[in-house]
């Protein structure tokens, strides 16, 4: 299910995580050459992706919302 990005936070390992409108969280790592997301490295890049839809596998699986992170 496609869900819009509503915010970001960093996990305990300083990896960026997108907060989705559905209440789930999804890592948005920049880990070349496997995953190239250079936009996640800057505030402007992250701001530019607000509202972009990501496929939420947790929604597809019917998982409950993730814990709230501020």
Image (cartoon, grey):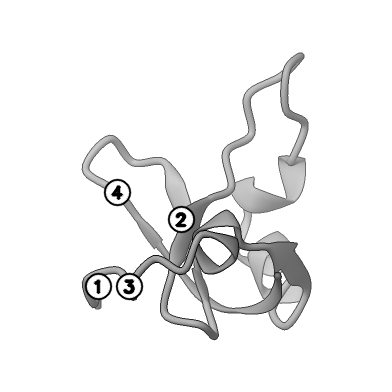
> Pointers 1 and 2 in contact (CB under 8 A)?
yes
> Pointers 2 and 4 in contact (CB under 8 A)?
yes
x, y (%) of residue 3?
A: 67, 77
Residue at screen point 63% across, 24% down: 31
If you read the primary sequence from the N terminus, does the residue marked by circle 2 or circle 4 appear first? Answer: 4
> Pointers 1 and 4 in contact (CB under 8 A)?
no
Q: Which residue is mark 3?
A: 64
- From the viewer's perspective, tell me whether residue 27 is left or right of residue 36: left
- Which marked residue is nearer to the observer: mark 3 or mark 1? 3
Q: Residues within 10 Å of mark 3 (few under 14, many from 20)?
A: few
If you read the primary sequence from the N terminus, does the residue marked by circle 1 or circle 2 appear first? Answer: 2
Query: How far, Cα to Cα, is label 3 from label 1?
Result: 15 Å
Query: How far, Cα to Cα, is label 1 from label 2?
Result: 10 Å
- Which marked residue is nearer to the observer: mark 2 or mark 3? 3
Q: Which residue is mark 1?
A: 69
Residue at screen point 42% across, 80% down: 23
Q: Residues within 10 Å of mark 4 (few under 14, many from 20)?
A: few
Mark 2 secondary-structure assignment: strand
Q: Which residue is mark 4?
A: 11
Q: Residue furthest top?
A: 33
- From the viewer's perspective, tell me whether residue 48 is left or right of residue 58: right
Q: Which residue is mark 2?
A: 17
For this rendering, which residue is in front, 64 or 70? 64
């Amino acid at each position: 299910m496609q869900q819009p990005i509503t915010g970001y936070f960093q996990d305990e390992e300083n990896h960026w995580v997108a907060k989705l409108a559905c209440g789930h969280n999804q890592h948005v790592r920049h880990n070349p050459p496997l995953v190239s997301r250079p936009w996640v490295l800057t505030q402007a890049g992250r701001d530019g992706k607000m509202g972009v839809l990501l496929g939420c596998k947790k929604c597809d699986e019917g998982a409950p919302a993730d814990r709230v992170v501020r």
